[in-house]
Image: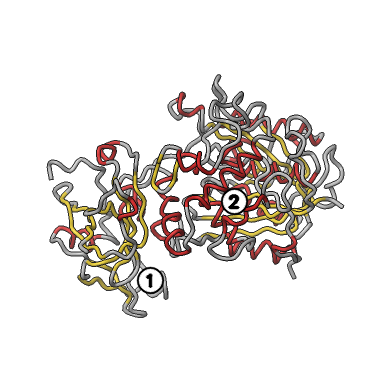
Amino acid sequence: MADYNKPIPSPDPYVTKPFWDGAKEGKLMLPRCTSCNKVHWYPRMLCPFCHSSSIEWFEASGEGFIHTYAIQNRAFGAWGEETPYCLAYIDLKEGDRMVTALRGVDAENPTSIKIGAKVKIEFDQADEDTYVPYWRVVD
Amino acid sequence: MPSNPSMSAAIVAAAESDKIGYIEEGTTALMLHIEAIRNVCDAAGIKPSDIEGVFSPNNSVLLAEYLGIHPKYIDTTSVGGCSFQMHVHHALAAINAGIIDIAVVSHGESGYSNRKNGGKGGLRGGGGDPWVPSEQFGSSVYGAWGAPSHYSHALTRHMHEWGSTKEDFAQIAKVTRDWATLNPRAVMHSKETHPAGGPITVQDVLDSRMIVWPLNLLDICLVTDHGGAVLIASAEKARSFKTAPVWIAGAGESMSHQDIMEMGDFTATSAKASSESAYRMAGMGPSDMEMAMIYDSFTVTAGITAEMLGLTPRGEGPSLWADGKASPGGQFPVNTNGGGLSFSHSGMYGMMLLIESYRQLSGTAEDGIHGLPGKQTDAKSAIVNGTGGALSVTGTLVLTADV
């Protein structure tokens, strides 16, 4: 925790709280519409697919796949110390997509990173209450 | 029954600020706005007080106050680089509705001078609200720092899904640079205007510094100072100025997302929807277009947009620039000012698209300031697309010459 030197997101105490509470326990909590059964990300007050307001939260598998990625050859602040590193969009196994700084890849060799590769989530404790999600290639 | 606004208004004049590009003595966004508005009024032969509507992505009320005018239509739509295409759309609607007869669309942006002025004078809004979804869950959490961090993902996905290559997209930068060599005001016009100016090759693009793989430096637009303004007038008034009209045949706007984390298909933008609206309004289609001004914040922006505008098959956007078709002297000129890649790009490039389209279709694209021989094309119609945010929002216009 003490060594988390990146910008820390500021969770809102309303709509997104179940995600951040789950993150503290190392669980990926996702919102799902009880009307159309679709998972959406980011968390919303209503389903962006069918517009129902009946949203439930469930513990997801924490698994996903690389959708696309890019190598940050330059960055600023504490992220500047990490270059080059890989930013990636992750297709969640249960549906929809998250962004992450991807771990377990060789950012010096961009073409070695494969779209479709399997990834798993992990959480870094950033401060007392905030655990930031990261994804890691497990293939 | 509402009437089709097609051709109910025209762009009747276009002008830039006194200086554009790398303004070494410094400037501010407000100065650039006001210079451009003064210049466009002078060109058309009107006074600022003749303006009834003010459209700008900055504070249009501030512009009106500074000019000492009191417009009856005020629009501060601010959605990035395509804001100006939307302003034309909105002004067309307001004119067609009979609310106003003369509008100004204005741009002033001190992208270059901001660096030395610590951001002061940039007319920038405040910082992001930490509770909006993109601040909690978007790529800024992971160190994404600007447009290259976002657009790069689209190129990776395009190469994966459509089998395109970096060479395909680099060709766009090469052809665009060829146009810049015909525009003396382009930052990259020649070795005299910039040490790295003058013609480039595909290999030069591939060999340039890697910024965010797969985007090299020469896949990425400039960051300059730029001001510009166009006047829009009703059909009744359109021929009453010193300058000639270029008709707004079609206009459309759309969006797919605000933050790129919500972009469903990384190889497609809302330019498909906004261009379909514009073509429908105009009663025209891609095959009726004789040139294109396509937002080129990055080579990938232009390549994907060419597909969305219906100018190439899906997955083959860069082919629009192949075999000299889009080059000077080619059968379908594209980005004849040298583009955001090689002419000028202050952050929001949409005004430069409007000004160059106006010049091409009014036959004023090479009078010494606006271009060297060979820059003026014989196009009588143009598809003009703006893209804002992170491939987020688009505005598309179909413009036609006065005949």
Where does residue B244 sit, x and y in percent of width and height? 83, 43
User: Which residue lies at the image location 51% right of the left edge and 62% below the top edge?
Assistant: B268
Name the quadrant of the N terminus of chain A.
Answer: top left
Q: Amino acid at mark 1?
A: Cys
User: Which residue lies at the image location 55% right of the left edge and 54% below the top edge?
Assistant: B303
The residue labelled by disc 2 is B386
Does dot 2 land on a helix, a strand or a loop?
A: strand
Q: Is residue B205 left or right of residue B133?
A: right
Q: Chain of mark 1?
A: A
- Marks counted in the figure total 2
Where does residue B111 sit, x and y in percent of width and height? 51, 33
Seen in the picture, residue A115 relative to A4 is either above or below; the reply is below
The residue labelled by disc 1 is A47
Seen in the picture, residue B399 relative to B370 is either above or below; the reply is below
Does dot 1 land on a helix, a strand or a loop?
A: loop
Residue B265, located in which quarter of the rendered image? Answer: bottom left
